[in-house]
Image (cartoon, rainbow, N blue to C red):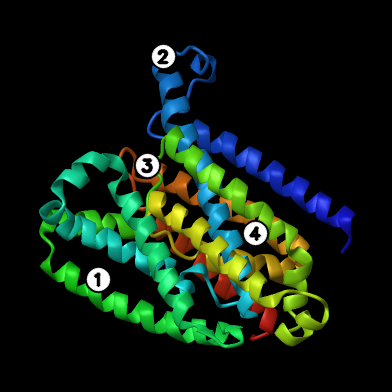
Amino acid sequence: MGNKSLSLSLIFMAGLIILTVVVSSYFGALTINWGEVLNFDSLDSYIFWQVRLPRILAALLVGGAFAISGAVMQGLFRNPLVEPGIIGVSSGAAFFVALTIVLGGKLFPALIEYLNDYTLPVAACIGGWAVTAFLYYFSKHNQGVSVSAMLLVGIAINAFIGALLGLLTFIASDEELRSLTFWSLGSLGGFDYTKLTILFVLQLMIVPLFLFKIRAMNAMLLGEREAKHLGVNVERLKKQQIWGVAILTGSAVAFSGGIGFVGLVIPHLVRMFFGSDHRYVLPLSFMSGGLLLLFADSLSRTLASPAEVPIGIFTAFIGAPFLGYLVYRQSGMR
């Protein structure tokens, strides 16, 4: 596949995203009257600019962050079943959010009141990055960071944090349990333009760093020793990738909650259709992840309107059977 094929693929994905954005912005609890969108005193204008457009942009950014992070992790570990949560970001974020929901109001009421709507995002960011730092430290040895050790330690940490989450769930009140459950299933309903700006600026800093390292990431597919012979600074690349994924995933989880499956399914599907070349995998994963989450969010806010179904339910319903079917077809199991 050459540059022309890549360009056509990107143009096709961009057109599909634009079409989905238009359809998604039209449907909801209230059908938008396009003639009133620019009349800023109308209800249609308020719903479009202050409610639906932030959710649409959030879906594109959050889905893109999860998917490109999954693509980077799968390339780093050379394993298509790895997803961003393996470095502890998701579990760390979930643990600190649970701590904040269950114990935060009792231990730090003034801080909770000061942070207000940003309490859970701040807690999620701190938790995700703290657990990643812990995991990174215990995966280092004299020669650098061992990805196999990181995988094993990550599994152990995720299991341990799962036990702690179970304990917090046990002692939580009914209201706290409801908040924790709803956060763990994910939602894009809390986004405003301030949160979108924070997410966009972080992605503007991290995503280009991934794209600039495409050749080095392709070399890593051959193995670490072969990549070193090709002139790749392997340890620096691993450090950049791990912390880049931690920042992207941590910020996305902080604002959207525990939306699963996007970082696992999308990169795997892109590789099945376009191969392992990161020139295709990274940009197409980012765009496809945004498209999947936008579709899932559209279902989330329309199927049970005016109520909202947690978006994580739809990503699992959409992603799991689709991935299983494609793997079944690809392996020729008939």
Residue 179 percent location from the top left of the image: 22, 54
Residue type indicated by callout 1? Leu
Query: Is label 2 in contact with label 3 (beta carbons under 8 Å)?
Result: no
Question: Can residue 275 be seen at all in this image of the molecule?
Answer: no
Among numbered discs 1 and 4, the one appearing first in the sequence: 1
**Residue 248 sits above or below residue 54 on the image:** below
Q: Is residue 271 left or right of residue 105?
A: right
Q: In which quadrant of the rendered image does the C terminus lie?
A: bottom right
How dense is the environment of label 4, judged by Cα within 10 Å: few (below 14), some, or many (20 and up)?
Answer: many
Front position among marks 4 and 2: 4
Among numbered discs 3 and 4, the one appearing first in the sequence: 3
Q: Classify mark 1: helix, strand or loop.
A: helix
Which residue is under mark 4? 285
Identify the mark at residue 333; answer none if there is no mark. none
Among numbered discs 3 and 1, the one appearing first in the sequence: 1
Identify the mark at residue 42; answer none if there is no mark. 2
Residue type indicated by callout 4? Ser
How dense is the environment of label 2, judged by Cα within 10 Å: few (below 14), some, or many (20 and up)?
Answer: few
Mark 2 to mark 1: distance in Å?
Answer: 45 Å
Name the residue located 31 percent from the left edge and 38 percent from the top edge: 306
Front position among marks 2 and 1: 1
Q: Classify mark 3: helix, strand or loop.
A: loop
Among numbered discs 2 and 3, the one appearing first in the sequence: 2
Identify the mark at residue 165; answer none if there is no mark. 1
Which residue is under mark 3? 189
Name the residue located 70 percent from the left edge and 71 percent from the top edge: 272
Mark 1 to mark 4: distance in Å?
Answer: 31 Å
Query: Is label 4 in contact with label 2 (beta carbons under 8 Å)?
Result: no
Residue 36 percent location from the top left of the image: 49, 15
